[in-house]
Image: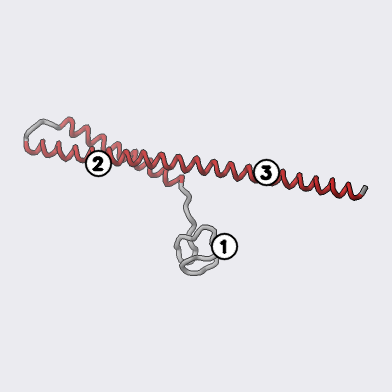
Amino acid sequence: MPFIQKIAESAKQFGSRAKDFSGKAGDKARDLTKKSSELLEVTKMKHELRKMEKEMENNLAGIGALYYQQQTGRDSVEEELKRLIESTKELEIEMKDLEDQISSMQPVPPNCTDCGKELPEGGKYCSYCGKKITE
């Protein structure tokens, strides 16, 4: 009987460890899914930022062309010039907000307390000054 009890106890411990492992694996999977979602969101934001930068370039080129026309007296372009300038100002604000959002979503790597350089991920010592990294 003691042999069967030992086997039963071992099976119970194995089951408990398997349950703990599956819980930890589930947590890691959720973390990975969250990080993937955040990375996708940052990528979308960066794509939107590039579109805004292109629109900004087009606005500035248009402003330059309209200003030139205005200075040479060819056309009365004041309304269009004002519209483009306002649009460009709004774009600057939107771009700044988007850059701030992207910056806040990306992790900030730790810096060495001794030399101030960025620390390598998972390292035990600073790559620059050799100081031991404390957690």
Amino acid type of the residue that numbered disc 3 sits on in the rendered structure: Ser
Q: Position of residue 54 (x, y in %)?
A: 28, 40
Identify the image quadrant of residue 46. Answer: top left
Would residue 26 be found to the left or right of residue 83 on screen?
Answer: right
Q: Secondary structure at mark 3?
A: helix
Q: Residues within 10 Å of mark 1 (few under 14, many from 20)?
A: few
Where residue 32 appears, as percent x and y from the top left, is 55, 44
- Front residue (pair 58, 19): 19
| Sequence-earlier tag: 2 or 1 | 2
Task: Please name the amino acid that badge 2 sits on.
Answer: Glu
Q: Is residue 91 left or right of residue 25?
A: left
Secondary structure state at the residue bearing disc 2: helix
* Distance between the alpha carbons at the discs numbered 3 and 2: 52 Å
The label number, if any, that marks residue 57 in the structure image: 2
- Colour scheme shown: secondary structure
Give me the residue at 49% from left, 60% from top: 120
Q: Residue at x 48, y 66 (%)?
A: 127
Marking on residue 22: 3
